[in-house]
Amino acid sequence: MIKISRRSFLSGCGAITAANALPGLGLLNAHAQAANQYKALVCIFLYGGNDGNNMVIPAQAAEYNLYQQARPNIAIPQGQLVPLATNGQVRFGLNPSLQPLQAVWNANRLALVLNTGTLMAPLTRATYQAQRNLRPINLFSHDDQQNQAQAAIYNADPKVGWGGLVGDSTQALNPGNLQVALNLTGNDVFLVGANGAPPNIPQNGSIGLTGIAANDPRLTAIRGLWTMGAASTNLLTSSASREFRAGIEGSQALATVANAANAAVDGAFGGLNTGLANQLRRAARIIAGRAQTGFMRQIFFVSMGGYDTHENEIQSQGAQLTQLGAAMSAFDAAMVATQSQTNVTSFTMSDFGRTLRPTSSGTDHAWGSHMMVMGGAVRGGTTYGTFPTLALGGPDDTDTSGRWIPTTSIDQYAATLATWFGVPAATLPTIFTNLARFPVANLGFMV
């Protein structure tokens, strides 16, 4: 049978066929890899609204005391923080569940981007309260804020994502116009571009043809049909036949690297078998096999849920962050083992942050939160942006619950990643339509 998860995969995979069928093109791809031109972005989305207040915690006494006083029943004990040193000084610590990421920070491959969110324009507490038109629509709503973070569109229901548009703008960098975006987690707006949704690569099972061997007579018959179709004088028939062939043969080439064991990658992930680890392992295999597939640009979307911590936050978020820290650390190790670390940048996003004021044993929906960026091209071991003033009803609070008004926008965060990825400066405002409202378009966390 033929098993292709999305129609758009057909138009994206033609170059894989060419790369494998034409030795000259394969050699050119190998030279391109040697020239270190391949780049990949990996978005790790944390569904439910990750509590940044319990992920990145002030380590110094004065700031820690403000944090602990505001949430006495769910504060992480100061002695349990994972210290993050910058130039010998420790201002912040990570949640202890993220212990594996300390080594990545110390290797300068991990950075924090503080108090980031869905922000249309710079806001103060006064302008937030006075100018409702500058707030994202349906602020504090899961579905709306998830889509807005993935699209950088805050005043309408987005139909395309900024990852998809970044892919559109860099698709010409792939040989044969090979599609950039690959979804490893489900149907999300992040990777939807002008030409529709990207291929959805399943975690289990094969891609392309299943149950048909290379010498199967049915495959011979299929090849005969598409050869006849490609020779047709009817443009629709010939075009469909070519795309059909490209999709099938191309998906087979992608399946070769996605499904096959890779000693370096699989060794880095060890015995990890969580949903996020499995998604990142598959992304790492595809990245490691780029010389076989011909990709020069790729954007992956992976995700995990469970961050809507209204109750039992210490246990619930701790369990989620344990999976996150282990999976991200393994992915970093896989990139190092395959000599891909300078070519690949992974980053986190979430619906929103959570209130500093606890509900009882948990927290409520809020706004600004902290993001992590990881990779060999990251100027790591330090923070970017501005940490909020930890005061209920203070200058960064929308009300009196500690819902932080972001001081860094998704537009700035994403545009910095897109610039590194190769999006031309002139194209950035067409993808991030609010970018010009901010004084700085590039946050400087990428080389």
Image (spheres, grey):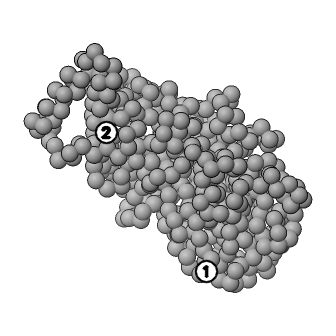
* Residue 204 image position (x, y, % from top left): 31, 56
Q: The residue under label 1 is which amino acid type?
A: Glu
Horizontally, is 123 left or right of 269 in the view? Answer: right
- N-terminal of the two: label 2 or label 1? 2
When asked about the image quadrant of residue 81, the answer is bottom right
Q: Position of residue 343 (x, y in %)?
A: 51, 39
Q: Position of residue 77 (x, y in %)?
A: 68, 79
- Callout 2: 10 Å neighbours few (<14), some, many (20+)? many
Report x, y in % for residue 160. 57, 43
Can you tell which mark lies on residue 251? 2
| Residue drawn 35% across the image and 46% down it | 5
Residue 401 occupies quadrant: bottom right
* Secondary structure of the residue carrying numbered label 1: loop
The structure residue drawn at horizontal position 57% and vertical position 37%, both measured from the top left corner, is 166
Mark yes or no: residue 247 visible.
yes
Dividing the image into 4 quarters, which one contains the C terminus? Answer: top right
Q: Is 249 above or below relative to 267?
A: above
Give the amino acid type for the residue marked by disc 2 in the picture. Ser
Pointer 1 residue: 311
- In what quadrant of the picture does the N terminus appear? top left
Left or right position of 441 against 192: right
Query: Is residue 445 visible to the viewer in this orientation of the structure?
Result: no
> Which residue is drawn at the image coordinates 61% and 47% (left, top)?
158
